[in-house]
Amino acid sequence: MGLFSFLWRREQPDRPAVQARYDAAQTTPLNQRHWAQSDWLSPDAALHPGIRRTLRVRSRYEAANNPYLAGMLSTLSIDLVGSGPRLQLQIPDVDPEDVRTREIEHAVHEWGRAIDLAAKLRLMRVARAVDGEAFALKITNPNLDGVQLDIRLLEADQVANPLWILEVGAIDGLRLDQAGNVAEWHILRHHPGSLTYTGNVGDWVAASKVVHWAHRTRPGQHRGVGEIVPALELFAMLRRYTLATVTAAETAADFAALIHTNMPSTGTGASMPEWDTMPVVRGMAMALPEGWDATQMRPEHPTTTFDMFEKRLLNQIARCLNLPYIVAALDSSQASYSSMRGDYLVYRKTIACLREDLERNVLDPLLTDWLDEAALVEGLLPSGLPPIADWNWRWIWQGWEHIDPTKEADAQTIRLSNNTTTLADECSMVGRDWREVLRQRAAEMALMQELGIAPAAASEPAAPTAADDDEAV
């Protein structure tokens, strides 16, 4: 009996002993090796610098050498960020069509293009999946006109304690305040893997100057862990199995024939040197020595099950990224319309959550800093607007191409007609600003009327059929 159990029983003598059992809590000869690596460490202790460094370098190695993983990372970043978010301001007591609102939105858009914000966001998405976290340092870029706010991306390796010895109150590159919030980050002046690295020499930077976007899996976890970490062993297994399959096929192809004797051990046949080789000419006929026969080598590797094995393994790998198989493998040959819609529902919900997370951790703080600096640039922000603290905004992301545009258009018509949606929501789902849509449509209608062209009549939504759900893609 352990000390804890003994004290617990002494403090509660009248309570009957609990006889409940959990199979998973038992250690048996059959499962002890499986659970040998389990521990009770805290989140930060389990992800100490050495462990995270090993996970990072292995994840980066796999991302650089595995075409499936490289494609998944590219898809994740493009689907999440696309061509970049667009700002849509909502200023109290100011008409959305007010030219001043549009001027500010345009200025923010041009600033984002100047600092290549979309590309940096895509790279941060890849870093979050591979390294577990992405860092960006807010800097002043003198090459920019007007607002000179910019961000410089940092790898997780460059955020670390000054010394390998743990500092009291610091958790591998960060300090917490009394409320448990991150107060400062320690950023090394050189990357630990660079040729100019001179040790853990760096500077403590206020948390307000650092953007940190991490993948956390446990409460109280301060540093991130890569999203692809659970699949690293499976990625390695897939590559090894692929190489083994290719090796088996090449070996069988390299050996054109094996020559062996049918003579009994007591018999005699023509003498041939062991392990002898001879060239083979296409289409030739050859006479073998007396007592010898030739057979062609056959590959015994189970190549017929390779596709099945690869698909099941990719399904497991893609699951930790919330990727459907058709996206991870870029293969929808066996999918139907309904199955693709079902798979994409989970995937797009994941993207919606990540976009909200990205807005809260990266975009909103950057926009707040941009507005603060823009207020100091003469003539950049129009006059006569309410205080910036009262402004509201939303980010419009690049939309999705629907699998069946006709079905989606019919659904939009129904939703708008029964007032269960708004044009702003419908346009935002496809990455468009409803005000721009209406302005452009009004201009087109005016020109059509001027030219005497009658607008096309709206068609009624098509009635769904029973075959729709099973329609092949």
Image: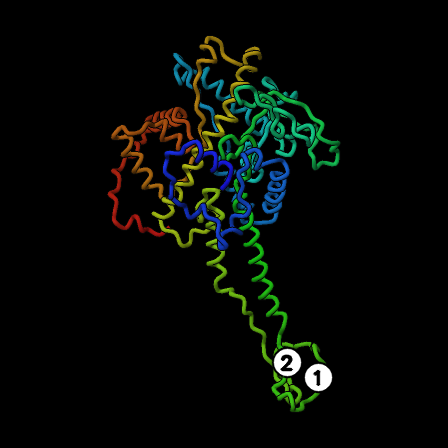
Q: Left or right: 373 with respect to 428?
A: right
Whether 57 is drawn above or below 115: the answer is below
Q: Secondary structure at mark 1?
A: loop
Nearer to the camera, 339 or 61: 61
Nearer to the camera, 126 or 177: 177
> Can you identify the residue that label 2 sits on?
259
Q: CA distance from mark 1 to mark 2?
A: 10 Å
Q: Left or right: 464 with respect to 473?
A: left
Q: Position of residue 264 (x, y in %)?
A: 62, 88
Q: Position of residue 126 (x, y in %)?
A: 55, 38
Q: Residue at point 66% right, 77% down?
A: 280
Q: Position of residue 470 (x, y in %)?
A: 31, 51
Nearer to the camera, 329 or 108: 329
Amino acid residing under circle 2: Ile
Furthest toward the top, the residue is: 384
Residue 370, image quadrant = top right
Whether 253 is drawn above or below 35: the answer is below
* Image colouring: rainbow
Residue 143, image quadrant = top right
Q: Secondary structure at mark 2?
A: strand
Q: Which mark is residue 272?
A: 1
Whether 222 is drawn above or below 59: the answer is above
Whether 244 is drawn above or below 255: the answer is above
| Residue 62, visible in the rendered structure | yes
Q: Which mark is residue 427?
A: none
Mark with earlier residue (1, 2): 2
Amino acid residing under circle 1: Met
Q: Position of residue 144 (x, y in %)?
A: 62, 21
| Residue 82, visible in the rendered structure | no
**Other residues around mark 2 within 10 Å, as few (<14) / some (14–19) / many (≥20):** some
Does the CB distance between marks 1 and 2 fall below 8 Å?
yes
**Other residues around mark 1 within 10 Å, as few (<14) / some (14–19) / many (≥20):** few
